[in-house]
Image: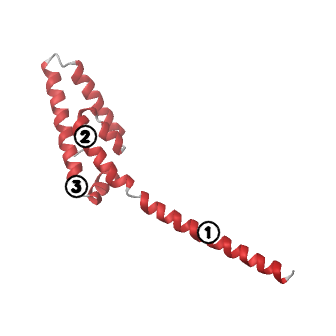
Amino acid sequence: MSEEQNKSGNNANEFADEAKKTANEFSEGAKEAFSGIGGDNKKVLAGVIAIFFGSLGIHKFILGYQKEGIILLVASIIGYATACLVVGGFILTALWIVGIIEGIIYLTKSDEEFYNTYQVGRKPWF
């Protein structure tokens, strides 16, 4: 092999190594940049949705609690279906209060506390 070919091969290897290094740095930077998307934004979104639409259980679905979301949704449907009766008003009022309380709790927790409690610890209620 000639000296030029050997030099050319070394340059190609150096370029490949630099490209791998740059790709790894980009990957790590992207992971770091996007790691906050699941924490703070989910907290704010779940809190605001809980305050405005808490009786429907949408905030539970956002946090990944399907069973609890379905419970709230079915209870809301029952509440609306029996709204002409006194019991429907009580059901809807109770669900509204649950949504307000959970929304306030979500929004007043620190990001780390919210993440550890509701996303890692999977605490479904209050």
Dot 3: element = loop
The amino acid type of the residue labelled 3 equals Lys
Picture quadrant where residue 16 is located: bottom right
Asked if the residue at tag 2 contacts the one at tag 3, i.e. Cβ–Cβ closer than 8 Å, the answer is no
Give residue 20's mark: 1
Q: Nearer the viewer, mark 3 or mark 1?
A: 1
Q: Which mark is residue 40?
A: none
**Residue 92 placement (x, y as % from top left):** 18, 28
Q: Is residue 65 visible?
A: no
Q: Is residue 122 above or below residue 53?
A: below
**Disc nearer the start of the sequence (3/2):** 2
Badge 2 local density, few (<14 within 10 Å), some, or many (20+)? many
Task: Give the alpha-carbon distance from disc 3 to disc 2, as whole Å.
Answer: 14 Å
Q: Using the image, determine if residue 103 lies above or below residue 57.
A: below
Residue 121, by quadrant, is bottom left
Whole-percent x, y for residue 81 in the image = 24, 19
Residue in the image at 72% along x and 76% along y: 11
Q: Which residue is mark 2?
A: 50
Q: Secondary structure at mark 2?
A: helix
Which residue is painted at 31% across and 40% down in the image? 60
- Left or right: 116 with respect to 3? left
Kind of residue sitting beneath label 1: Lys
6 displayed left or right of 107: right
